[in-house]
Image (cartoon, rainbow, N blue to C red):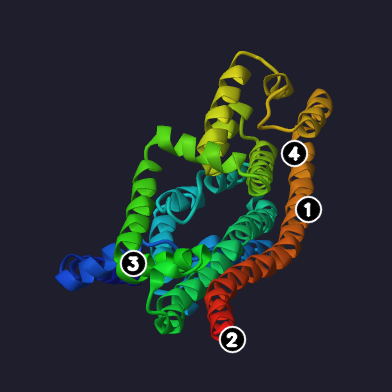
Amino acid sequence: MSDVVILDEAIEESLEVDSSVIWTNESLLEQINNYFLKSQKIWLKEKIVFYRLLSTMLNAWMSLIKWIEVLERQEKNKVFKYMLWGFLKRLKEWDKLSECLEGHPKSFSKAEIWVVRSWEKTWKLNDVLTWLAEQIEKVASISWKLKWALIYPAFVLLVVVGVVFIMMTMVVPKLLEIFDDKSALPPMTQTLILISDILRFYWYFIIGWVILVIAAISIWKKTPWWKYIFDRTMLSIPIFGVIIQKVVLSKFARIFSGLISSGVSIVESLNIVSDAVWNETYRQRILLLKEDVKWWMKIWESLDWDKLFPDIMVQMIQVWEQAAKLDTTIIKVADFYDEQVDNTIWAINKLLEPLIIVSLAVIVWFIAVAIMQPIMNLADTISQG
């Protein structure tokens, strides 16, 4: 029996040596491929499925390593497959799941890692994973609604600009060729000709300036000071600033609630949330809130009379902070702002439709009048002659 055991150990050792040799003897192309696979992040949908399946398997008393092996074999996405292979390797070396997630900061946020780490200590990881997947879905949903609220009018504006550009560069010049003396034309028609000439002969300057402005804003946003100014300006935009504020408050409330309910300290939770809101203005304010809490100040006292946090939110925090039920209150605040964002975006979409129609009507009216006015004058002159 001992000989069999010794033989098995020898085989395992030989396999380990062979695998290490294979790993060290990888071709340069394979090493580059593995580097790019490691540097990429997985899709949000895959991460949510990962959490849900993991919770289901743990509820069925399947071991974590066994479940990762099953998922790794059937995964089609090469990035996620490589990531699961790394998880499997580290778990076999007695690393924790939170430590595996920590090795991929592009795919898993600090808040997720802290929640998993806290629940690992209580041996109730399966209870939090389903909840974590649901919260990630809600945060992603509210973020997508914000992007749609900004993308939809931008797309419509782009279409309008494209239609006007085609009309001014192709249609209008052909129609105005019938007039020899351009100086005798009405002011509206001369304005139309001027705009048409600028778009026809200097369009590359316009595109260049637009690209330059976008590039400058993108570079300035990477510095904390300019990012603060940019985010502050976005919050001051009518209607859209209100949506951005509600989305940020929903993220703040939802992530903060999850961290507190997982046993993370309030100070550490605020530090993590400050990076998760993706708004430099709120990030700086949350960091100030963290310093106030360090000095034993209540959260509602620090946020009171602050325009970044509405009074209703501060009052709810005050009531439930005194009742020591802050985590349950904050999640209700997040649900409240999610609903507010839905209603606001629905109202904006309804208002944009007639506004777009009126804008197009005004543009078409201006072009039509500018073209038809000299034609009508020419017809009057001919009839009088």
Q: Return the disc, 1 or 4, that comes first in the chain's sequence.
A: 4
Amino acid type for the residue under numbered disc 2: Ser
- The residue at 17%/65% (across/down) is 24
189 or 330, which lies in front? Answer: 189
Q: Quadrant of the C terminus?
A: bottom right
**Residue 383 badge:** 2
Give the distance between the C-alpha atoms of the residues marked 1 and 2, in whole angstroms. 65 Å
Where, quadrant-wise, is the N terminus in this rendering? Answer: bottom left
- Looking at marks 1 and 3 on the same chain, the residue that comes earlier in the sequence is marked by 3
Residue at the spot x=42%, y=84% of the render? 178
**Quadrant of the image occupied by residue 23:** bottom left
Residue beneath label 3, please?
203
Tell me: residue 270, above or below residue 148. above
| Depth check, front residue: 10 or 217 | 217
**Residue 32 found in image quarter:** bottom left
Name the residue tied to disc 1: 339
